Image: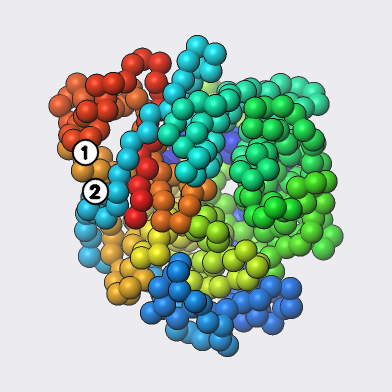
Amino acid sequence: MLKSQGKKNNDNKSTIMMKFSNLSSVMETGDHFKNGASLKSLMSRGKIKVSVVFSFILLGSQLLHSQSYTNDLPTIDVTNQYYQKEIYMQDVAKVEYIPLETNDKSPMRSQIKVFYMSEDYIIASNESDGDIFVYDGKGKRKYSFNHKGQGVEKYIRINSIAFDEAAKEIFVSVWITDNPEILVYAENGAYKRTLPCPSNFWPYLYNFDDETLLAYDMYGIFEMEGYANQPYLFISKKDGRFTDSLNIYLPVRISNTARWVGEIDGKKGNIARSIPIDYNRSFGKNFLIADWSADTIYRLTPQKELQPLIVRKPPMQSTDPKKIVSNYFATDKFMLLGVCSMDYEAMKNNQPLSQRQIMYDFRTGEVNVYRLKNGDISAQHEVTISDAITPENIGVAVYSASYLLDLDKKGELLGDLKELVKTLDEKEKTVLMRMKF
């Protein structure tokens, strides 16, 4: 879910970005579709094919038909007061809990982020500490390594991780540095090669096919002739060169960060407060493309075909404050979205933002505000689905073992989760909830 970050987190990513002066001038509210990323303009350009999906066609297993531009797309009105309902995971999915194995040689110092999950692999990391963990599909540790540091073969801080399961290669995008790069390791942590990146390019990475990575420029400050203002690029896994781009052009983008000059411990300085907002997701062999500044969420096929799936209204630029739509999760039956009012003044004053979670049912066209609940937890707990790359119709949520043990002491665990907690010890820091829809 979307949560505001307070002053105590000023050493986070948003604060680090303040050293780059052009960030604040590019990522601001503005005319994000100026000269470019409307549906009609996408279709008028030649590089990427665009097809429109009728709202009554189920996603996933059925054939999608191309047609000319139409308004027959599913639409979410972000201003509507939709009926709210609670959804228990056990009612809509098969739930499995997976404790991640750890030991003295691979300490898990804090809760981790899962980047990839399949039947045979789980790839996770503690981004700030630099730990990378490789598990089998049941959570048994295969490898762990940490190459945090200065110099060749090392990363200062992890920005994102992509995993090529066929080649068993791990691609690490390095967090903001003066010399951006992508480091490639074998699954056991052995260094293989470095893919250099242009200035101001710290991409979020996705494994696209055998030869290329899909790179997302989330900050909007990368400016290179031929690729400026295009946040979706394809990169060669071999040498790092750009091989193609999605024909989505966003000259001005909305920031998820409020920045101002204020006092910190009695001294004036730059302050930044941001909220995490989900964007692109995997959908089986496809991707769901959802930039914060866009009014349309697209499906990207392995053939690089962009298929508009769902449109929000009113357009973001007509709302005040700007209402950003985030992409939480999708199955072949429904899509989960978030709507957040990007009120920078409220963020500066540490006030809560207006936020809602919305579900669109592809089969019925029904739209609801929703709350995801875990039937094995009796407390007012909501499930947050990770943005990990997963197989189609598979979701994963992350629990810290300490959180679950605390709930157990309060008598708030039920069913399978209560039984699982009996087997946990102090060394096990993380439990995954795997949901098959």
Mark 1, Cα crowd under 10 Å, few <14 / some 14-19 / many 20+, is some
| SS at circle 2 | helix
- Check disc 1 and report its element: helix, strand or loop: loop
Q: CA distance from mark 2 to mark 1?
A: 8 Å
x, y percentage for residue 118?
49, 44
Which residue is farthest left? 411
In this rendering, the answer to whether 209 lies above or below 297 is above
Quadrant in which residue 225 is drawn: bottom right
- Tell me which residue sits at (56%, 83%) in the image: 66
Q: Is residue 243 above or below residue 350?
A: below
Tell me: 118 left or right of 420: right
The disc, 2 or 1, on the residue closer to the chain's N-terminal end is 2
Type of residue at label 2? Answer: Gln
**CB within 8 Å, label 2 to label 1:** yes
Residue 275 visible, this orientation: no
Number of disc labels: 2
| Quarter of the image where the C terminus is located | bottom left
- Most foreground residue, 99 or 400: 99
Residue wearing tag 2? 90
Against 60, residue 109 (above or below) is above
